[in-house]
Image (cartoon, grey):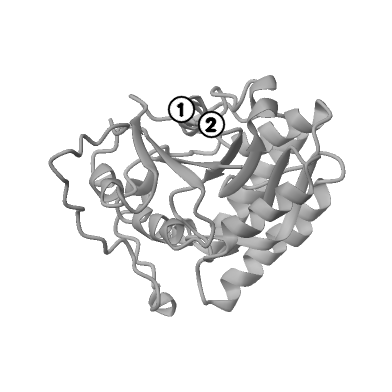
Amino acid sequence: MKLSVIIPTLNEEAYIGLLLECLTNQTLKDFEVLIVDGNSTDGTKDKALQYQGLLDIKFINAGKKGVSLQRNLGEKHANTGHLLFMDADGYIEDDFLEKIYKYIRQHTDVDILTTWVAPLSDKKRDKIIFYAYNQFYLDIVKYWKPAGGGAFMYVKRKAFREVGGFDEKIVLAEDHDLIVRMHKKGYKYKLLKRPDIKTSIRRLEKQGRLKYIWSLGRSAAYFHLVGPIQDYNLFKYVMEGGSTYEGVKINLDFLKDKKFGARKPAKKSENDSSEGIS
């Protein structure tokens, strides 16, 4: 059983290298990586191409930005029946995919799965914020209107197609919306505490932690009490990907044993046509 890892990107040159390094180091090797780009203007593509030969990787240009559109396009290009959606600024331990693989093999009735999200930070305050999000939001709403972060999501491809994939009209909390629609259709959802995925704290650093908590709470309340969020201006959400956080400094010294996108461009052989890369 092979897996398809789908990563939407938009100006993620500064972050995508760490996730691709994590994927390169996975103990499970039977998976493909599809990077679906929303017309990045930085070196995202060049960074991704450094991992040719190390990963079964394809770079797909979506032609325009839109995280739901990009994820849906990734599904169309996937070659397996098992979809794993990840955000470009994520970080996973070396055995993450192996543990997810074993779980879905042992629990074949699970159609959609997410995990707890942890901060890619060694600061206690950041860990408390994310613990509260997991314990007092995700773990509670799963009983009546389940939600889950888009940092990582596993979905059976057949079920994904039957509900129409991600709603491309939604601009925020599209991951929550997919889970709710699948739950209403009777598909089984599971939230795992472990393994967890770590995500960068760039948004916390950019907004400030109190503003981040406030905006997260407002958007969650709107989603659960009103419905899907289809207006960018409602929460002043800026859809510019990694460039939104240009200049934000993130300390990753505690990851000294990991490379941070330090790969050099792979040398192409005379027979290398870079098939599958656009």
Quarter assignment of residue 108: top right
Q: Residue furthest left?
A: 270
Q: Is residue 215 visible?
A: yes
Whether residue 257 is situated above or below residue 113 in the rendered picture? below
- SS for callout 2: loop
Q: Which mark is nearer the camera, 1 or 2?
A: 1
Amino acid type, residue under disc 2 in the picture: Val
Q: Position of residue 150 (x, y in %)?
A: 58, 45
Q: Residue at 61% across / 71% down in the picture?
A: 127
Q: Residue at 79% across / 47% down in the picture?
A: 107
- Cα distance, mark 1 to mark 2? 23 Å
Residue in front for this viewpoint, 28 or 166:
28
Amino acid type, residue under disc 1 in the picture: His
Q: Residue at 60% across / 64% down in the picture?
A: 118
Q: Position of residue 242 (x, y in %)?
A: 36, 48
Q: Residue furthest front?
A: 271
Q: Quadrant of the N terminus?
A: top right
The first of marks 1 and 2 along the sequence is 1
Whether residue 189 is situated above or below residue 75 in the rendered picture? below
- Residue holding disc 1: 77
Q: Position of residue 104 (x, y in %)?
A: 71, 47
Residue in front for this viewpoint, 187 or 101:
101
* Residue 247 in the figure: left or right of residue 236: left
Residue in front for this viewpoint, 53 or 134:
53
Q: Is residue 116 visible?
A: no
* Residue 88 in the figure: left or right of residue 234: left
